[in-house]
Image (cartoon, rainbow, N blue to C red):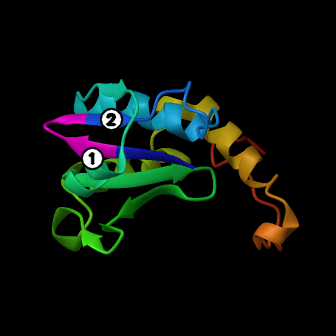
Amino acid sequence: MCVFIARDGQLITPSGSNDILEESITRQTVIELAREYLGLETVERDVDRTELILAEEVFYCGTAAEITPVTSVDRMVIGGGRPGTITQRLIEIYQQIVRGKDNAYVANCCLLMTLALMVPPHHSLNIRSPVRCPHQVI
């Protein structure tokens, strides 16, 4: 999973060289969506615990988690305890894309759907019917 913070009108996320960060298609998609839809650049650098607590917004992302708001860190409330405007807007945009209502990222959508099906069984993903990308033509 990848973490983002919103602070002073920009997104900040740990850099790809960080030991705990794995390359992520969802992370790259969030960076692109923030730039293209919200006009926000993402700064990639180290982020310490204090910055998480002082952030206006915090969210994490991943294939299964999609974009998930964080409203507290170590019992310290972030952003009044509610998802912030940037986080909410990114969730809306991301949902439009993965649900097939926005064709801007067709390739990413299909890849994300494929990766979601690869989650190992011990992660409690239980698919009873075939899942397909909404962009696929039958």
Q: Does the image show residue 95? A: no
Q: Position of residue 4 (x, y in %)?
A: 38, 44
Q: Secondary structure at mark 2?
A: strand
Judge left or right: residue 122 versus residue 8: right
Q: Position of residue 17 (x, y in %)?
A: 56, 24
The answer to whether mark 2 and mark 1 are in CB contact below 8 A is yes
Judge left or right: residue 79 versus residue 118: left
Q: Which region of the structure is painted magenta? A: 5-10
Q: Amino acid at mark 1?
A: Glu
Residue 51 got which mark?
1
Q: Is residue 112 above or below residue 10?
A: below
The residue lying at 82 percent from left, 52 percent from top is 118
Q: Amino acid at mark 2?
A: Ile
**Along the line of sight, which residue is nearer the eye, 80 or 92?**
80
Single out the mark in the foreground, 2 or 1.
1
The residue lying at 27 percent from left, 47 percent from top is 51
Q: Earlier in the sequence, mark 2 or mark 1?
A: 2
Residue 12 got which mark?
2
Q: Position of residue 47 (x, y in %)?
A: 37, 39
